[in-house]
Image (tube, grey):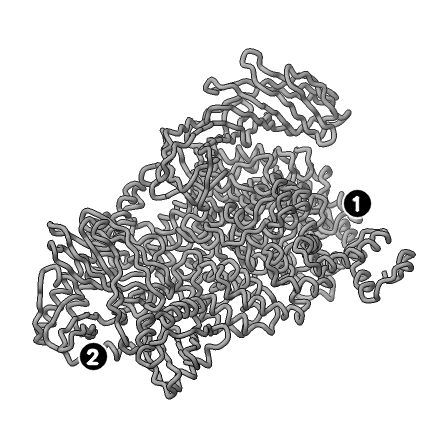
Amino acid sequence: MIHSLFLVNSSGDIFLEKHWKSVVSRSVCDYFFEAQERASEPENVPPVIPTPHHYLISVLRHRIYFVAVIQSEVPPLFVIEFLHRVVDTFQDYFGVCTEAAIKDNVVVVYELLEEMLDNGFPLATESNILKELIKPPTILRTVVNTITGSTNVGEQLPTGQLSVVPWRRTGVKYTNNEAYFDVVEEIDAIIDKSGSTITAEIQGVIDACVKLTGMPDLTLSFMNPRLLDDVSFHPCVRFKRWEAERILSFIPPDGNFRLLSYHVSSQNLVAIPVYVKHNITFREGSSQGRFELTLGPKQTMGKGVEAVLVSSQLPRGVLNTNLNPTQGTYTFDPVTKLLSWDVGKINPQKLPSLKGSMSLQAGASKPDENPTINIQFKIQQSALSGLKVNRLDMYGEKYKPFKGIKYMTKAGKFQALLSN
Amino acid sequence: NRAPGPAWLGYSSPGSSLSLSLSNRTSLIDSTCSDLFLLSTRNDDLKEMLESNKDSLKLDAMKRIIALIATGKNASELFPAVVKNVASKNIELKKLVYVYLVRYAEEQQDLALLSISTFQRALKDPNQLIRASALRVLSSIRVPIIVPIMMLAIKEAASDMSPYVRKTSAHAIQKLYSLDPDQKEHLIEVIDKLLKDKSTLVAGSVVMAFEEVCPDRIDLIHKNYRKLCNLLVDVEEWGQVVIITMLTRYARTQFTSPWKEDGLFDENSETAFYESDEKKTKNGDEKKSYMMDPDHRLLLRNTKPLLQSRNTAVVVSVAQLYWHLAPKHEVGVITKSLVRLLRSHREVQYVVLQNIATMSIQRKGMFEPYMKSFYVRSTDATHIKSLKLEILTSLANEANISTILREFQTYVKSQDKQFAAGTIQAIGRCATNISEVTDTCLQGLVLLLSNRDETVVAESVVVIKKLLQTQPTQHSDIIKHMAKLFDNIAVPMARASILWLMGEYCERVPQIAPDVLRKMAKSFTSEEDIVKLQTVNLAAKLYLTNSKQTKLLTQYILNLGKYDQNYDIRDRTRFIRQLIVPNEKSGALGKYARRILLAPKPAPVLESTYKDRDRYQLGTLSHTINTKASGYLELSDWPAVAPDQSVRNVEVIEPVMIHLYFYYPCPLITQMKLCVLESSSEAESDEEKSSSQSSEESDKSSSQSEKSSSESDSEQKKTTKKPPQKKTVKPTAKDRYYNELFNTYGYTVLSQSKCLSRSLFSLCILTPCPLSCAAALLQVSGPAFVPEKRHDLLHRMTGKGLSAQYQFPRQPCLYQPTMVSVQISLTNTTDHPLEQIHIGDRGPTGLDMHCFNTVECLLPEASVTVSLGVDFNDSTQAANFQLCTKEDQFSVSIQPAVGELFLPATMTEQDFRKEQGKLLGMNESSATITMAAENTTRQPISRQVATVANLGVVPSGQDNIHRFAGKTASSGAVVLVTVELRESSAALITINTEKSVMGPMLLRDLKRALTRA
């Protein structure tokens, strides 16, 4: 399976290597660097690269390439999924997954990688099992360890490893028992010039933060479960119950986890929460162009649209812009031609707009293509699909937990086309 | 490198460490000599720290060494200092030493051997984590000398009590195999053993080992197939992927193709049933001949829920399983899940899109409803864009082509020119595939010729060229248009394409073609090679059709070509000249020049590059890179005739056994087995009937499950409930049969009560019987002693009046030789009859049990004895289950003493010694004790030992040595006990068994029994 792992930073240096079988020379990464050079953008490096004796499978996260070396046939997704799990674990342990964080905690990283794979086959990837084996570094613990001489490494096999609920450890205790659920929906949409929707779909997740004593058995039911078109569950969810009753029944992991992700398909009508009005003109022969952009709320169910950020890649011919926002700030990078406008909150009474002129390269011809506009926004306290949690019940424990639920809508890949 | 710098001159450490640090210089140190100086002291420093007494210092040193290793620097010279700490008590330190050892053991083999004994000791540790990590490290040290030790350790760990250790041993199998492939046969034995393991933790790892070591030994899977299918949902996600991939391969060799009757609804759906009358006249016979194997259905049914997994690898592996195994009309269930994965990370998208691309070529319908999911976003990476384009092109048909073309129009305007070029090719493919839009596409492409971007224009020219070839007659004006553009196009491929078009259709544009050639003659020398070749080509064709105008031009070009730098062009020129210019030397070929050069050429077929990818199993690395990766296992074609299905039956088709109690003259109740031969046709046919019935039912349920999910669920519940029902049916048939049997043998059946006679194995018979096949069947002796001791299973207070006690009759179990038989006596202490006493839910630990048949009715004050078989897997783990009556359920558990897990064996003293010789070292545990006063002679010792453990006495020649032998019930491992009396009531107890856990436990029990006053 996975033979070795190399971590490569954005400037092309290998800053960590780990081998699970015999040592593979780091020169194997030269094939990767070659591919990296060929690719125009960091994202364009192909995830699977065959070399004469090995295969390199890489993922790019947080501007770090995680390059796994494979020697024989294995499902590529197996490796990709595992690498992403490694990144998630690092993030979980160190808060961030940056080169600096990894270098600072190199011993913990090594201990983690050692536990996660045995002979290249995943051994323990469940975060709470790992945390029992290797305790995450905190300042307090470092201090205590230096004084008492105790270690960060568990001496017993984590209870989860053998149980039927490997995601939960036994003996969890809290003074305040609480369970929070965040329903977060992202809307992906492409809007054409006339404002009509080309595609729109909603991807939702329910993230949970459960801090409950003992072995609680929770059920979560929805007002309108039929909305959920396609779902994928955390392993703790009992699939049979869902199939039969459309109820989520589960013994939760301890702490933060993603309970469910779902999809509301484009077949259903999706309400688009914002609209864009724009007018961008380049005149043939002249070195000036006009730029006009107005945003407005649309079908937001009475909730305010916040944290709006508009960005657009302007054509190469644009030298500079001279624009006036009615609110917020805008920047234009003349090198990358990236225009970004931090709008903030949309006030329905006074719609934000950005107007002004662009100066074009003298003598250059009118650009063929019009840019696309990417929009980010957030709407608090509302799930765009209308999904509503009905109730949360707990069985198996006596105490009364504090329960909370939050809804939020965000823009995912929300694009407005400006082409003619 | 070796030249000492100024700082070195002042350095005065011993030569050895100097050279070491020198060799490290390049890898460790950036530039300055002062740094170098610092480093050499640092390594000494590390050594010093490792040799100190303080754990904290050692730990610090190890952490720094690990940091060196992590950055790829060489820390091998510290090996001797590090390896000393392998036995450290500090667990973190120990782990870091392990990491170091695994990294460098291969380079320092001799020194690494020093650490082996530590691991061997750790393999015996009571802490399972320590046992497991010792095995992990021991097997990761790639030193060929220790292969035998590894082999032994793996075998031992494979029967460890802890499933975690067994999982580790499955991983170790692969490591040993890669170190020494000669061990294959032995390793296969271990794999076979582990495949039988019922723990979900082990399943994934052992299948992985199977795939690496012996993927061709499909016969090892048969018996475990159903178990794997049923465990699958509970296996950890990585194991699921491996098992699903393996089972896909397995199923392709064992089942017949479900694809033959494509278009018919289901193998036995109701419609098929009703329509069969009409259809039979035509082709009903062949269609009805296919019946899906219930095991095939089982696999499909049990993998389906995994489509909802959060692990993308699991989802895709289920998708490929359905693609390769499911009937065509059922494959649709995977679509939604695959589309869902497109929201995941970029790398996941890449692999999933590739798989969809291959699928969408064969089955457009599957993904057509989700077409919009494949629309390209400007933020997508280039390889994602081109894959989406590929899929959109494959999905195009008459109905949706207009939507797709509109989408393509926006792509053409994309700023990513490479992507725009890809789109133009895609348009070309759509145009050839769908004849309705060919003209529209061509018009659109011609418009693109006036695009400002060169790449776009060039690509359009190339695609137009291909399109024109398909219908050249109508398009002379397009060719003219392109000729006009010729001056503005600089991309060589496009220029070459135009020249080729001119030449090919020169008779349609007689005015323009010679003019183009004239221009080319002028610029010939400055053109790219590919353009030059086409110029020569054009010249030749024009010479043949229009020699009057172009003779001179052609000769001029041929002369230029003759002296070209590129030998390809020189060659071509020479060839063309010989072919077209008639001279005395040119032979017969010249006559055919026209037919050679101006032959009608078939139009190119524009095909997807994913067309031939389906030769690889979907989801594999080979499929992704489109070449056979090393270690790729071919997916075989369906067999024409299914191999024997019965190989997967787990209950060995053994003769029906009856267990009878006889009233012997002696009060001892002897159990015995009566073998009924296969000739007893009635029983068999009965069984067959019921099993075929149930398989039919399960099939039906699955077919209905396709109709609606809610329905299917209830249906599935029914099928899961089925087994108990089936069991209640069986006894009646058998009962009748047994009664008949007894009548023929002239036995008198004593049916004390109805419930007693129903309980199959409690038939009481008065007459003594001469048969004694129990001993003959199993090569074990009868128990030396059967303890009377009964253990409480259920107290009458907690059992609401039902009380139950159990005891170990120490008889070989009838149901399966690996089980330990347990007798349970149930007593009703209430004043009303208790009905339907049976065993309910067995809890998650899942020890294999053979339940007793339901006791239909237990009258007040009556009691009944039933027997049970439990496979304890040679561990003292309690068997938990629920004892149920009609109204109530009680959780109970049977906790065996270690001594009850054996079966006594007879052997000679000689054999005993021989066996003992094989089980020395790690397999031996011994203790010296002071014997209680009364236990000093043969009789009491034998009694005491036999009370503790179900072992047989081995005749002994010496008076002071007593030997006992037996084997474990589950795995049949030999257990040997020796009690050697020494002077002054001291005694040495030695136990030899490969069961490393049972040995010490037995020793402890024996010690207690023999020292007790």
Q: How many marks?
A: 2
The answer to whether B657 appears left or right of B266 in the picture is left
The answer to whether B468 appears left or right of B515 in the picture is left
The 10 Å Cα crowd at callout 1, few under 14, some 14 to 19, many 20 or more, is: few
Image quadrant where residue B868 sits: bottom left
Instruction: Evaluate whether residue B959 shows in this view.
Output: yes
Q: CA distance from mark 1 to mark 2?
A: 110 Å
The answer to whether A235 appears left or right of B686 in the picture is right
At x 22% / y 61%, what residue is drawn? B824
At x 32% / y 52%, what residue is drawn? B843
Q: Does dot 1 land on a helix, a strand or a loop?
A: helix
Instruction: Evaluate whether residue B608 shows in this view.
Output: no
Sequence-earlier tag: 1 or 2: 1
Under mark 2, the amino acid is Ser
Viewer-nearest residue: A24 or B732: B732
Which label sits on residue B522? 1
Q: Does dot 2 land on a helix, a strand or a loop?
A: loop
Under mark 1, the amino acid is Lys
Q: Decide: is A291 above or below A214.
A: above
Viewer-nearest residue: A35 or B567: A35
Image quadrant where residue A144 sits: top right
At x 68% / y 68%, what residue is drawn? B108
Q: Quadrant of the N terminus of chain A?
A: bottom right
Q: Which mark is in front, 1 or 2?
A: 2
Tag 2 subunit: B
Q: Position of residue B414 (x, y in %)?
A: 62, 34
Tag 1 subunit: B
Image quadrant where residue A374 sits: top right
Q: Position of residue B234 (x, y in %)?
A: 40, 51
Q: Position of residue B418 (x, y in %)?
A: 64, 41
The answer to whether B900 appears left or right of B560 in the picture is left
Which label sits on residue B772? 2
